[in-house]
Image (cartoon, rainbow, N blue to C red):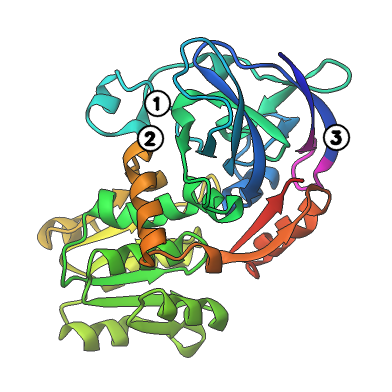
Amino acid sequence: MSSTVRAAVCRSFGEPLAVEELTLAGPETGEVRVRLRAVAICHSDVSYADGEWGGELPAVFGHEAAGEIVEVGDGVGFEVGTSVVVTLIRSCGECHRCQNGAEVACSTQFALDGRSPLTDRDGASIVHGMRTAAFAEEAVVHASQIVPIDGDLPADSASLLACGVITGVGAVVNTAQVEPGSTVVVLGCGGVGLNVVQGAAIAKAASIVAVDMHAGKLELAARLGATHTHDLADGPIDDLVRSLTNDEMADYVFVATGAPSALATAGDIVGTMGAVVIVGMPATGVAGSFDPSTLAGNNQRILGSKMGTSVIARDIPDLMQRYHDGDLELDGLISRRFPLEQINDAMDEVRSGAALRNVIIFD
């Protein structure tokens, strides 16, 4: 059945979001309605709201959330009351890509791809942004987008598992499959980059170099497993990488920022047989260049990593266990907590680079 929810609506790109009352239709076959307890603000949400990637408006964004199921549609095996993480990864489990472990690239069209469950007070449709629309008190998503979590895992920390953590750790473990003893450089230590650092530590990389322009982020990177840190204000990173590798350069360079300059840096510091892994999402139209003869001659690779190539039913439980075992930081990645009414302040901090993950908490 339908419900009335408060949600932060983007009606004009680059303008503050408006908290409005919307109608949320109930779940249909294969779908669930989740009462959200927390939603983290990913930089992708800011990019969409600022119009960097285009899209239709009005829309509700937000895709990194946790809460509990309050209603299920036909054919759903989850029970009402179950605590869950809500992600944007929607998968059928049956197409060629899903069968080959690439659920993030599922090619199936779902009912929610063609209709939004959200309407405003005038009955006009509101775009179901990022397949989730989690900047709202409740969300309707396909059942493949949720993973049950332990009831004792705080909702704000659990929400980070929906994107930032699986994207960063997954880029290392799933996409690049970093080997023990490798040299890893992480360009950008925001919410995703810090999780790349955690992933490299999990993979037992020998050298993990964290690069950023914010001293506080570099300090946290060191606590999360970085063996070396470098502030770009001190100059290029090349000499440090050379000294750590006897001039062999890095085995893996993770670009965890959308800054175009990071792409050029990555090409300069990746070694023979090495890989550049693109994790950050720049604005539409931003491009980088690599010399194909160098790539071929040095057996180098460029890998794209969407959502850490994650299989959420496998990866999120594993990450939860690592959190409980003390091997994965979640709580310390949260910068500040805000009510929904202050979402624009929370997004401004993310936009400026001052925050790692700000989290909206629902009553």
Comes first in the chain, label 3 or label 2 = 3
Q: Is residue 219 above or below residue 91?
A: below
Q: Which residue is mark 1?
A: 91
Looking at the image, how many numbered discs can be counted on the residues?
3
Residue 160, horizontal then vertical, whole percent: 52, 53
Q: Residue at x 24, y 54 (%)?
A: 176
Is 49 displayed left or right of 225 in the figure?
right
Secondary element at tag 3: strand
Q: Which residue is mark 2?
A: 104
Residue 9, horizontal then vertical, whole percent: 78, 36
Amino acid type at circle 3 is Glu
Cα separation, mark 3 vs mark 2, equals 31 Å
Q: Residue at x 59, y 50 (%)?
A: 155
Residue 5 is one of the magenta-drawn residues: no
- The answer to whether the residue labelled 2 contacts the one labelled 1, judged by CB atoms less than 8 Å apart, is yes
Magenta-highlighted residues: 6-18
Cα separation, mark 1 vs mark 3, equals 30 Å
Secondary element at tag 2: helix
The quarter of the picture where the N terminus appears is top right
Q: Is residue 360 above or below residue 331?
A: above
Amino acid type at circle 1 is Ser
